[in-house]
Image: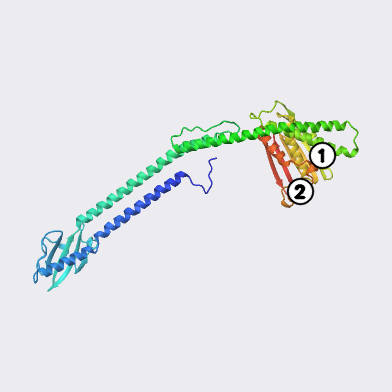
Amino acid sequence: MNKRGLGMSSLQRKISAVFVLFFLVMALGLTIQGNLSQHLIVHPLWEELLESSTAQMLADGRPAPKPPPTGLIRGWRLGAGPIPTDMPPYFAGLQPGYYDEERMDSYESDLSHAVLVTPVGDGERIVMAVDITDLENYQNNMALVSVLIAVLSGAMIAGSIAWVYRSLRRPMGVLAERMEELDPEQPSQRLATDFALSELHDIAVIVNGHLERVERFIERERSLLDQASHEFRTPIAVIAGAVDVLRLHDLPPAAEAPLARIESTAENLTEIMAALLFLSREDGKAPLETTRLDALVLTLIDDHRHLLEGKDARFVVDVLEPLTVNCPEAIVRIVVGNLLRNAAENSYQGAIHVRLAGGRLFIQDSGAGFDTVAAARRYTLALRNSAKQGGGQGLGLFLTRRVCERFGWTLAISSNPAHGTLAEMTFI
């Protein structure tokens, strides 16, 4: 009951997949945010700002411009003289050009600058720098916060998955166990609805409603079966009585065979009605009777020999060990009689082996098994001879399986087109 199909997925897996997908999307968003903030550090805006500041300084202070001495944007004019004391010394070694924060990482570690070196003639250079240390520190802090958010979110998602798994798996397992414990042989069974989850409570209520409808349906079917069985007993008794009355008269020899078929059919119907009445009982308890199965098998073989008339087939009794079963003879007669009748109707030549040993009854016919061509041919022949042979295999097999279920017997049928069909019935 706990096995799952390969194509099935559990609710926990689906919920976990949603949480994991949410975490991946959030992690992707944080990564994109970090890349965008990093791009702000190396944005071309800083180069344009430094070029504008350098141009403004040259336009305002010709021929000897003075760079801004303080602020985030600072400048220095370098010539043949000494390096200004307020300028980072490694700026003096930079060649003309623009240096963004990534290129400046190889020169400085604690600070972050974007630097523009512009030659102005006579070997002089203007070094213009913007201090973006605070901006980079802010970006690093934001990246650290993003990592912490991702870690905390991952932990919360993992905890949520574990909580959902525990809160759903256990009550759903309890519901499955309660449904597994329902015994179809015991009427008026209901599921307990004391679930904390309203969804499982609703499921249990719906299942109980379904069980109630099924019980009402079974009760109607049982009542109909019981009434029909009682109604059929009267005409069957009339037919059997008429046969007895006819046997008191001198009848022509040609009437003996039809009369025997009428009598046999009435007896079969009587047995079927008895089985139907037994199966329609709510308690399913049979009368306390025992039956000698070995003796009954011999009697039933004799009763079914007429089905082999005109065929090159015969019953062969291999072994008949003594066996007594706790079941009324009428019920056993239906079960074994159906197996013998099916074997006789499907055998046209050869032997039908019957063996009773070790609490098991084996009936091996010599038919064609379940070969499709032969089965179609036998089905056509059975339709032609249904009036002569009695038919009723479908109801007979149904009753056989129902009786086996009621008494705990097992019936196994195996077929081979080359060896026929083997019916194996275990009584103990």
Closer to us: mark 2 or mark 1?
2
Asked whether residue 408 appears in the rendered view, the answer is no
Q: Check the image and name the residue furthest to the top.
A: 288
Residue 95 to residue 25: above or below? below
Nearest to the observer: residue 320 or residue 172: 172
Nearest to the observer: residue 402 or residue 115: 402
Please state which amino acid type lies under the numbered disc 2: Arg
The kind of secondary structure element at disc 2 is: helix
Q: Identify the residue position indicated by label 2 in the image.
A: 378
Q: Quadrant of residue 102?
A: bottom left
Circles 2, 1 touching at the beta carbon (< 8 Å):
no
Q: Which mark is residue 29?
A: none
Report the residue at 31% width, 48% height from top: 149
Q: Quadrant of the C terminus?
A: top right
Q: Identify the residue position indicated by label 1 in the image.
A: 305
Q: Position of residue 219 (x, y in %)?
A: 62, 33
Chain-order first, disc 2 or disc 1: 1
Asked whether residue 24 appears in the rendered view, the answer is yes
Q: Is residue 16 left or right of residue 114?
A: right
Distance between mark 2 and mark 1 Cα atoms: 19 Å
Q: Quadrant of the N terminus?
A: top right
* Dot 2 crowding, Cα within 10 Å, few <14, some 14–19, many 20+: some
Q: Position of residue 193 (x, y in %)?
A: 48, 33
Q: Position of residue 386 (x, y in %)?
A: 78, 44
Q: Position of residue 272 (x, y in %)?
A: 73, 34
Please state which amino acid type lies under the numbered disc 1: Arg
Residue 2 to residue 131: above or below? above
The figure's colour scheme reads rainbow
Q: Is residue 12 left or right of residue 373?
A: left
